[in-house]
Structures are given as C-alpha cells and as structure tokens.
Image (cartoon, rainbow, N blue to C red):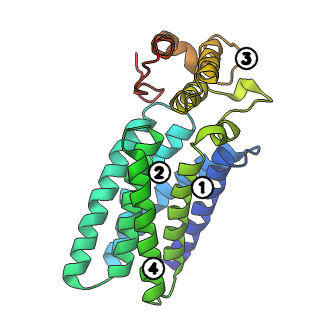
Amino acid sequence: MKVLKYILLFCFGLTLLGLISRTLIPFTGGNEILILGVLIMAILIPIYSIIALIKKQHRVESAMMLISIPLIFGTLFRLMRWPFGNQMIIIGSQILCLISIAILIYSIIKKAKIVESILFTTIGFCSLTYCFKILFWPGSKELIIAAFLTIAVAIFIIIKKKVVVSSSKVVLIIIILLFTLSFITKESRLFQISYIDLSNTKYNHPEDYYDYAWILYNEGDKKNAKTNLQYAIDELDNSNNEFADMLSKNRNNYLKTYNAAMDMLNNNNWNSLELSSGTIEN
C-alpha cells in the first residue's frame, strides 16, 4: 500500500506540474504531463480505495480521493477546452463539498480523525469556491473570502494541535494552495499572461479572449473588452488556430454567443457569462 501511495504522490506531482504549465509558466509538454498525471491517478485511486477499505486503513483519505475524481477530470477538461468540463466541475465540486461535510460530522461524533476531516472539509469548501470562481458565478468573491478564512482556521488547528504532517496531509495542503493559485491567475492582466499567448496567437482558444473580455468589461475597461471579444470572433475563422477542427463543429453556436455578447457590450448591459465551450452543444 505504501508503494501505491508513493506512485500516487508521483502522479500528483505530474498533475501539479501540468497545472503550473497551464496557469503560471507555460512550457512544452505541459499538456501531455497534465493528461498523463490525471489518467494514472484516475486508474490508481480506485485501486487504492479498495485496498484501504479491505485493510481498514486510511479510509477517510481514500474516500476523499475517490470522490474528487469528477472534479479532477472537470478541471482537466476545462483547461484543455474539451466539452463537458464545466458540468463535471459543477457536479464534482458539489459532491466533494457535501461529502466532506458529512465526513466531518461523522468524525466529530466518533471523535476520531477530526484534524484530517477538517482538512478535507476545507478542500471541499475550496472546491465549491473554485467552481463559482472559474465559471464566473455571482457570489464568487464572497466565497473566496470565506475560503481563505477556512484555510486560516485549518492551518491554525494544525499548528495548535501540533499535528505530525504526513505525506497525505502535505498533498492536501498543496491542493489548498493550488486552489488559491487558481483564484489569482483568473484575474485581470494575470489572466492574459496565463491564458493568452500574444507571441503565437494560433494557440489561443477564442474562449480565452471571450473570458478575458468579460473580466475587462467588469473592470470598466470596455474598449479593451470589445477588442478581445472581436479577437474571439476573428479566431473562429482562423484555419491556423490549433483548435480549428473542434471550433468548426460548433462555429455557429460560438458566433451566436459572441455576437450576442458584443451587442450587450455595445449597449452597456452585458450582465452574464453563461455560455462557454463546456455548455454549447449542437
């Protein structure tokens, strides 16, 4: 079981490295590393969970890893601009949050593994906040403040209880920090640095420009918002775009969405960002 845990930690490292390449420091091969790390984890986590259940060891830890799979896949699909990423993030974050709360209540009643359960609940709440933030839902800013407070409480408890930080707890803390990074990299100019490659536009998905235009509009920079929204429309017909084949299948739906957004922007009443590659279907 220890060997399997170490392999999982290695896969988590691959996934973390891939996420960094998609959000902070782009580098060649980052996408492949991210996909490989997620796929291996998706295979090994159920095996680890079955062994934990049989041996009656680390059951809470393994349960949390198991129910986090939909959210992990949702994040992968969202970052890679594949269909249904948004739906998996919504479902995965809600399941993770609700079950983490249930585990905390159970641990308090049984008076066992309370610290671990608090950490899991923190991750569950962060996952829900992540869902609101990455989908631009109302209330995300308030949830972020609450999430940071929850993280602060969790860290305070670890320090006060003088908890021995095992490898699994290290992973949980890293996940919390990763969610924190995801909040930062979706903001304003950092979004452009992280998601839009100005030196090679063929790698930019039109939705990147669309999301960035929405952020700029809400910051009051309507001129640059309009410019980026026009970039989104232009990239739909760019045959050199890396996503050209995928975009051609849904071009009319994307164009309808972007033109509607342009009309609302011009009328200064753009009030929602509901449609994206994860929700538009033929």
Q: Is residue 65 visible?
A: no
- Nearest the camera: 145 or 105? 145
Question: Which amino acid, by three-letter code, is at mark 4?
Answer: Phe
At which x and y percent is residue 27? 76, 45
Q: Is residue 103 left or right of residue 122?
A: left
Residue behind mark 2: 72
Q: CA distance from mark 3 to mark 1?
A: 29 Å
- Nearest the camera: 84 or 139? 139
Question: Given the current orientation, which residue lies at the most extreme right position?
Answer: 199
Q: CA distance from mark 2 to mark 4?
A: 27 Å
Q: Secondary structure at mark 4?
A: helix
Residue behind mark 4: 156
Question: Which amino acid, by three-letter code, is at mark 2?
Answer: Ile
Residue behind mark 1: 15
Report if the CB atoms under discs 4 and 1 are less than 8 Å apart: no
Q: Earlier in the sequence, mark 3 or mark 1?
A: 1
Q: Which mark is residue 240?
A: 3
Q: Secondary structure at mark 2?
A: helix
Q: Which mark is residue 97?
A: none
Q: Earlier in the sequence, mark 4 or mark 1?
A: 1
Report if the CB atoms under discs 2 and 1 are less than 8 Å apart: yes
At which x and y percent is residue 195? 65, 37
For the residue carrying disc 2, how many other residues have a C-alpha within 10 Å: few (<14), some (14-19), or many (20+)?
Answer: many
At which x and y percent is residue 259? 50, 10
Q: Is residue 109 left or right of residue 194?
A: left
